[in-house]
Every structure is written in C-alpha cells, then in structure tokens.
Image (cartoon, rainbow, N blue to C red):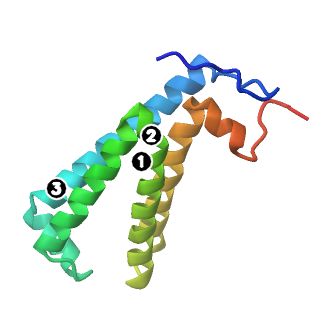
Amino acid sequence: MEINYESKSSTVLQPPSKAAKWTGRVISALIILFMLQDAVLKIIKLPVILKYCEKYGLDGPMLQGIGITLLTCTIFYAIPMTTVLGAILLTGYLGGAILLHVRFHDPIFDIFFVFLFGVLVWLGVFLREPRLRAILPCRCGGEK
C-alpha cells in the first residue's frame, strides 16, 4: 500500500528513513512475539502461570479472559491498518499490569519492565509512521 506523504494542508509529511522504518519494524515484531507468547500462556493456563498469578487473585477463567484480551490487542497492533488502535489498547493493558504491580508492592524492576514495554510499543509505531510523527510534539532533525 502506497502512502501519500502530502497532506491536504501545506505541511508535507516526511517519510521515515529506511533505518528508522526497519528499527520500528524490529521493535514492533519483538513486542508482538512477546505479547503473543504471554497471551497464549495465559489462554492455555500453563500451571507455572497459574501459580504466579495466584498472588494477584487471578484464577484460571479470569486468566483466560485476560489472555484473550491481550491476544486481541496484539492482533490489532500487528495489522498495519490498525496498528495505532492496537498501540492504544496495549497501552491500556500494560497500564493495568503496572497498577497490579504497584498495588501488590512488587519490586520496582517489575513495574519498570512493564513501563518499558509500553514505551517500546509506541516507539515501534513512531519510527515507522509519519502521520504519528506529525501529530506528536517531538521535533527531531533540527527543525526550528
């Protein structure tokens, strides 16, 4: 699918460089693989996952629902036409995970790890999507 980088206004969207586009793709692919693995492990109710989630009060059926939700969000993120929607949904999912870790006084590393995934979700999209770069308040490349 060809993207027209000229918007209807006088602003011209600059396409990402090859390096930025590929870096974004690699980051997004790693996020997708990790999230798919996490979703599948929750859906199949692997005993080690059930044991880990007991401390949070998450039982088998609830864990399956969480896994299906994560799988759905990840699929939206993986489809190019719905990537931004998927990123929004994954941000909400990861925000809930952060809340759970904070609520149970988990180590700061656990909280930071989930937060880092949220940042990487958006970094992957930002590096390859010129329309997202156009609306974010970040100016890169020496523009004044």
Q: In the rendering, which numbered label is found on residue 41?
A: 3
Distance from disc 2 to disc 3, alpha carbons, whole Å, reads 23 Å
Say what amino acid the circle numbered 2 marks.
Answer: Thr
Q: Position of residue 15 (x, y in %)?
A: 65, 21
Residue that carries the numbered disc 2 in the rendered image: 83
Mark 1 Cα shell of 10 Å, populated few (<14), some (14-19), many (≥20):
many
Distance from disc 2 to disc 1, alpha carbons, whole Å, reads 5 Å
Residue shown at 82% from the left, 26% from the top: 10
Query: Between tags 1 and 3, which lies in front?
Result: 1
Distance from disc 1 to disc 3, alpha carbons, whole Å, reads 20 Å
Q: What SS does tag 3 mark?
A: helix
Choose between 111 and 6: the one closer to the eye: 6
Choose between 71 and 57: the one closer to the eye: 71
- Cβ–Cβ under 8 Å for marks 2 and 1: yes
Mark 1 and mark 3 lie on one chain; the one further toward the N terminus is 3
Residue 97 horizontal side relative to residue 55, left or right: right
Mark 3 Cα shell of 10 Å, populated few (<14), some (14-19), many (≥20):
some
Q: What SS does tag 2 mark?
A: helix
Say what amino acid the circle numbered 1 marks.
Answer: Gly
Q: In the rendering, which numbered label is found on residue 30?
A: none
Q: Quadrant of residue 101?
A: bottom left
Residue 6 horizontal side relative to residue 139, left or right: left
Establish if 30 lies above or below 54. above
Q: Position of residue 41 (x, y in %)?
A: 16, 56
Image quarter hosting the C terminus: top right
Mark 2 and mark 3 lie on one chain; the one further toward the N terminus is 3
Say what amino acid the circle numbered 3 marks.
Answer: Leu
Establish if 47 lies above or below 5. below
Residue that carries the numbered disc 1 in the rendered image: 86
Residue shown at 76% from the left, 24% from the top: 12
Residue 46 horizontal side relative to residue 16, left or right: left
Q: Quadrant of residue 7?
A: top right
